[in-house]
Amino acid sequence: MDLASARREGQEGGDIVSEARTGKRFPLELPIKIHKQDSGGESSGVTGNLSAAGVYIRADASLEVGTPVEFEIALPPEMTGAKENVVIQCRGRVVRTDEPASGGKPSEARGVACVIDSYEFVRNT
């Protein structure tokens, strides 16, 4: 059964079927720094996609679902029209993790999906 069929079936039965994702996702590969709040560790990676509500990250960080995280995403000048990178500092939590492809090395990037609970733009002074 495909998604459209499931939605039709849900609507006919009176159930509401909804997409878990909210907002448009943009397939952007941007540098990201991840700060683990519980251990104080830091790792880096790249975004796989980004929306106002969340981000998918490819990084070597070992994060568990439910872990609170802080991360910084650097937007390059060509995206923002600024003279320098614009840094967005986000707070959120891990909602899904994907292990590297089978046969991958332990050091290869994992996929980490995070919901963004709050964010602010960091000004360089």
Image (cartoon, grey):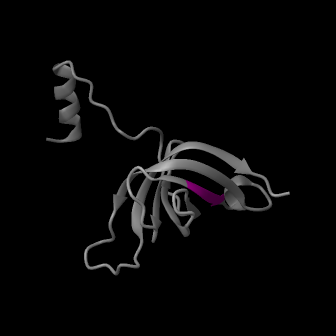
* Furthest residue in direction top, as rendered: 14
* Furthest residue in direction left, as rendered: 1
Q: Is residue 48 left or right of residue 105?
A: right
What residue is shown at x 78% (from left), y 53% (from top)?
123
Q: Is residue 22 left or right of residue 44?
A: left
Q: Main secondary structure of the magenta part?
A: strand
Tell me if residue 109 comes above or below residue 121 in the rendering. below
x, y percent for residue 51: 51, 46
x, y percent for residue 118: 59, 42
Tell me if residue 119 comes above or below residue 14 in the rendering. below
x, y percent for residue 30: 57, 63
What residue is shown at x 66% (from left), y 58% (from top)?
75
Camera-side residue: 31 or 12? 31
Query: Does the magenta-highlighted stretch encompass residue 26?
Result: no
Q: Is residue 20 left or right of residue 25?
A: left
Q: Is residue 87 left or right of residue 12?
A: right
Q: Image quarter for residue 74?
A: bottom right
Q: Image quarter for residue 111?
A: bottom left
x, y percent for residue 82: 77, 56
Q: Image quarter for residue 83?
A: bottom right
* Magenta segment: 70-74
What residue is shown at x 52% (from left), y 47% (from top)?
92
* Furthest residue in direction front, as rendered: 39
Camera-side residue: 94 or 13? 94
Q: Is residue 31 visible?
A: no
Q: How many marks?
A: 0
* Furthest residue in direction right, as rendered: 125
Q: Is residue 39 visible?
A: yes
For the C terminus, the quadrant is bottom right
For the N terminus, the quadrant is top left
